[in-house]
């Protein structure tokens, strides 16, 4: 009986260990969730450029946009994100031309932009230049006159009277809410997305208000699209769970609003430290990408241009978004210094001028291409804060990967500052990427910086 007692004790002890391990595993995973997304190899050092076809040229067509491909290729653009190119609903339309995000037919193109044949040829030309195409996808809602409203009204959410409804808690009166409790809708939506990958050979999607669509739909979508070809998925969202199985990239909205507040003088640089080294620690799955920007179509049309919001700090914050961990976004007209809010529901062409910022962005995008420290996700280097004598106004950091390194110094204030640095992690031999001058930086390094000044050193 003594032997049996020992055996039972051992068994109980073993079960206790197993139970404790099972209980601890979710807590451990919560701190270090790993993204299971297989990023396309070509995305590891890529940037994104948002194309507003309607406003890009006076013609507002695919053919007219194609005349800019050589210039965009020369600037260093990798991924072209096309805002929705589908036919726009006419019922309850906003403005005379309507919103791009009111989709009347998912597998057709807006005749104002051209034909499906012309878009497919444009995709081929983009691929020939080594660039990639992602298409803006609006899965949460359709136009009031989408053909599903006649053929499959059960695809939509309805009120107690059986009437279609607009998306809850919005003023999106030109669209109606789809019902993802309906499995047939899920199948139909995935088939529509599959068309663009199989037939037009696009490379992925930017998914509008992705957080309003069930995560398990996106997980399935990513898996099934990957059976066709490697795809790149960008979520208009800042929701960590979307990045575990479905999306490699999501929006950095919170940090964007922080930078706006800093530019306006309502916050200081300590808010950036809090974002990177406190709030964001362990929040997103390891390996996922954030997309950062100083403008996009929403900001430009509804909140003001980058010059309205950042003033003289435009270049400094552009450098910031291009060198911190994440993917930089450039919006149509940004490389021209276009300083006007574009109409959203009307024709309103961009004034291109002499592309004032072309070389500036080319410098930043080229740096990201060649320097592994700035690559995306786990392929790049972690951000390491360099403390200075004025951490509330100066954000300085290094990133390092293999033999590559960058040292970035940003005066994010309207004051002249003599900046002195602490520690030695920044010391080394570098090239100033904007002046192309070589410099040896020692531990006692100090530099005078003008308001909103920036320095980017590369090893």
Image (cartoon, rainbow, N blue to C red):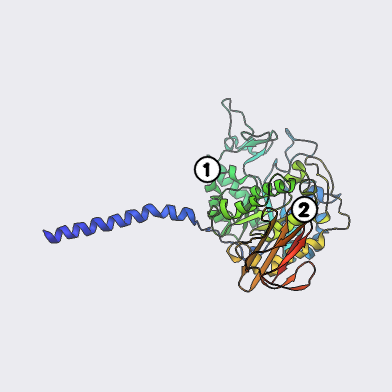
Location of residue 129 (image quadrant):
bottom right
- Write the residue at 69% across / 33% down: 173
User: How far apart are the two marked residues, 1 and 2, measured between alpha carbons?
Assistant: 58 Å
Foreground tag (1 vs 2): 2
- Write the residue at 66% across / 39% down: 142
Q: Of all residues shown, which one is farthest toward the top?
A: 161
Q: Residues within 10 Å of mark 1 (few under 14, many from 20)?
A: few
Tag 2's secondary structure?
Answer: loop
Provide residue 107's location: percent of width, then percent of height: 68, 48
Q: Of all residues shown, which one is farthest toward the left?
A: 1
Residue hosting label 2? 415
Residue hosting label 1? 183
- Write the residue at 63% across / 62% down: 376
Provide residue 276's location: percent of width, then percent of height: 60, 55
In the drawing, does residue 91 fall left or right of residue 180?
A: right
Provide residue 435's location: percent of width, then percent of height: 80, 68
In the drawing, does residue 21 fall left or right of residue 394?
A: left
Residue 125 appears in the rendering: no
Label disc, if present, on residue 273 of the rendered structure: none
The reply to whether the C-beta atoms of the residues labelled 1 and 2 are less than 8 Å apart is: no
Q: Quadrant of the C terminus?
A: bottom right
Q: Residues within 10 Å of mark 2 (few under 14, many from 20)?
A: few
Total number of numbered discs in the rendering: 2
The foreground one among 221 and 301 is 301
């Amino acid at each position: 009986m003594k032997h049996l007692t020992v055996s039972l004790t051992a068994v109980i002890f073993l079960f206790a260990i197993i139970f404790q391990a099972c209980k601890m595993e979710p807590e451990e995973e919560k701190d270090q969730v790993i993204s299971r997304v297989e990023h396309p190899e070509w995305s590891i050092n890529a940037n994104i450029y948002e194309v507003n076809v309607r406003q890009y040229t006076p013609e507002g067509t695919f053919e007219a946009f194609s005349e800019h491909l050589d210039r965009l290729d020369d600037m260093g653009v990798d991924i072209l994100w096309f805002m929705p190119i589908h036919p726009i609903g006419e019922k309850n339309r906003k403005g005379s031309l309507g919103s791009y995000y009111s989709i009347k037919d998912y597998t057709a193109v807006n005749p104002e932009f051209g034909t499906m044949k012309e878009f497919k040829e444009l995709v081929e030309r983009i691929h020939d230049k080594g660039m990639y195409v992602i298409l803006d996808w609006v899965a949460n809602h359709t136009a009031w006159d989408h053909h599903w409203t006649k053929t499959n009204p059960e695809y939509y959410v309805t009120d107690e009277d059986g009437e279609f409804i607009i998306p809850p808690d919005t003023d999106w009166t030109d669209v109606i809410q789809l019902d993802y409790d309906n499995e047939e809708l899920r199948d139909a939506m995935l088939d529509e997305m599959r068309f663009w990958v199989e037939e037009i050979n696009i490379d992925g999607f930017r998914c509008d208000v992705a957080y309003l669509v069930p995560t398990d739909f996106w997980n399935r979508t990513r898996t099934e699209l990957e059976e066709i070809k490697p795809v790149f998925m960008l979520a208009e969202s800042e929701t960590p769970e979307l990045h575990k199985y479905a999306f490699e990239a999501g929006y950095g909205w919170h940090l964007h609003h922080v930078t706006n507040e800093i530019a306006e003088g309502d916050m200081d640089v300590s808010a950036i430290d809090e974002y990177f080294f406190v709030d964001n620690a362990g929040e997103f799955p390891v390996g996922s990408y954030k997309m950062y920007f100083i403008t996009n179509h929403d900001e430009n049309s509804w909140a003001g241009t980058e010059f309205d919001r950042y003033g003289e700090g435009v270049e400094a914050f552009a450098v910031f978004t291009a060198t911190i961990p994440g993917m930089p976004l450039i919006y149509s007209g940004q490389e021209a210094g276009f300083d006007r809010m574009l109409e959203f529901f009307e024709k309103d062409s961009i004034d291109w001028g002499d592309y004032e910022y072309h070389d500036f962005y080319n410098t930043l995008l080229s740096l990201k291409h060649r320097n592994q420290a700035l690559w995306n996700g786990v392929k790049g280097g972690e951000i390491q804060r360099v403390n200075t004598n004025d951490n509330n106004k100066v954000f300085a950091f290094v990133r390092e990967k293999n033999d590559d390194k960058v040292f970035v110094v940003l005066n994010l204030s309207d004051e002249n500052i003599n900046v002195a640095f602490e520690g030695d992690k920044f010391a080394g031999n570098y090239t100033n990427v904007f002046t192309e001058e070589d410099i040896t930086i020692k531990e006692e390094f100090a530099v005078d910086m003008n308001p909103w000044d920036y320095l980017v050193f590369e090893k």
